[in-house]
Image (cartoon, rainbow, N blue to C red):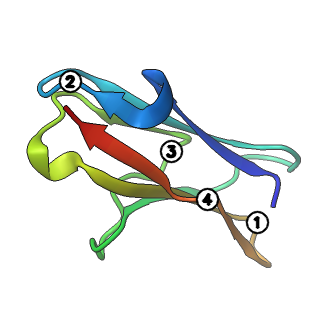
Amino acid sequence: SGVSLWAQPPGGQVVLGDRLVLNCSVAMGTGPLPFSWHQEGSGAPLGTGPHLELQHAGDNDSGHYQCQVSNGDSVAETVPMNVTVL
């Protein structure tokens, strides 16, 4: 799909209370593209930029996260990333 997702710290494992940043990037595209972040089981988008930051990761932040990018005609989404709060 040309859309990739990675985490800092790598692997999506974060210590309880620490900061986690998820990054979404698009291989090709023109102009600013709208991003939306979703956590499995949650209806509302968590964010709309290329990065999603969890300032103080909590127990309820564990789960699968996904980034979606729309170019107006179609929506591409990343493979879900499993985030684990240790």
Q: Report, in whole angstroms, how far the alpha carbon at label 1 lies from the one at label 4.
A: 18 Å
Q: Residues within 10 Å of mark 2 (few under 14, many from 20)?
A: some
Q: Which residue is drawn at 30% across and 71% down?
A: 44
What is the secondary structure assignment of the residue under circle 1?
Answer: loop
Per the image, the residue denoted by label 2 is 15
Query: Splitting the image into 4 quarters, where does residue 25 fall?
Result: top right
Report the disc number at residue 71.
1
Point 80% across, 47% down: residue: 31
Q: Which mark is residue 79?
A: 4
Query: Which of labels 1 and 4 is toward the front?
Result: 4
Disc 2/disc 3 C-alpha distance (Å): 24 Å
Quadrant housing the C terminus? top left
Mark 3 vs 4: CB contact within 8 A: no
Q: Which of marks 3 and 1 is nearer the N terminus?
A: 3
Q: Nearer the viewer, residue 37 or 12?
A: 12
The residue pinned by badge 3 equals 49
